[in-house]
Amino acid sequence: MIKITEENEGMKAIFEGRLDTPTAVKAQQEITPLLENADKTIILDCTNLQYISSSGLRLFLTIRKETSAKGGKVIIENINEEIRKVFMMTGFFNLFEIRNA
């Protein structure tokens, strides 16, 4: 599940649960507001995200690609240790600005 809110500097998407193939397909439609505001800063809050699959990673890449094209930026916040390992293994750790509060 994704909850999208407007922030001072741009948009924030709060991810919850699992971002696997079935949820990533649904999420692809839900991220439209993020893609429409890709010229701003987009924060992906993963505090309550427990799992991410390759489909979820692809979703994050879609957002990154759009923000790169439009001059915005993506910040990923609060990934857990399991997701951190996935990011390290796939090279995603170097593609995104990652902050942990």
Image (cartoon, helix red, strand yellow):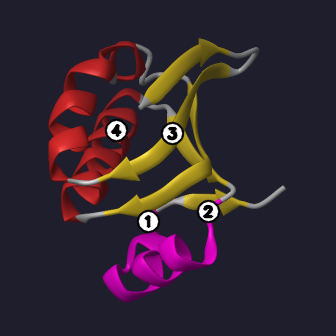
Mark closest to the chain's N terminus, 1 or 4: 4
| Mark 1–mark 2 CB contact (< 8 Å) | no
Disc 4 to disc 3, how far (Cα)? Answer: 14 Å
Q: CA distance from mark 1 to mark 4?
A: 12 Å
Circle 1 residue: 95
**For marks 4 and 3 on the same chain, the one whose residue lies earlier in the sequence:** 3
- Name which residue type carries label 1: Leu
Q: Which residue is mark 2?
A: 79
In depth, the one of 94 and 7 nearer the eye is 7
The residue nearer to you, when weighing 54 against 64, is 54
Q: Residues within 10 Å of mark 1 (few under 14, many from 20)?
A: few
Question: Which amino acid type corresponds to the residue marked 3 in the rendered image?
Answer: Phe
Q: Residue at x 16, y 43 (%)?
A: 22
Q: Which residues are magenta?
A: 79-95
Residue that numbered label 4 is attached to? 63
Q: Are marks 3 and 2 in contact (CB under 8 Å)?
A: no
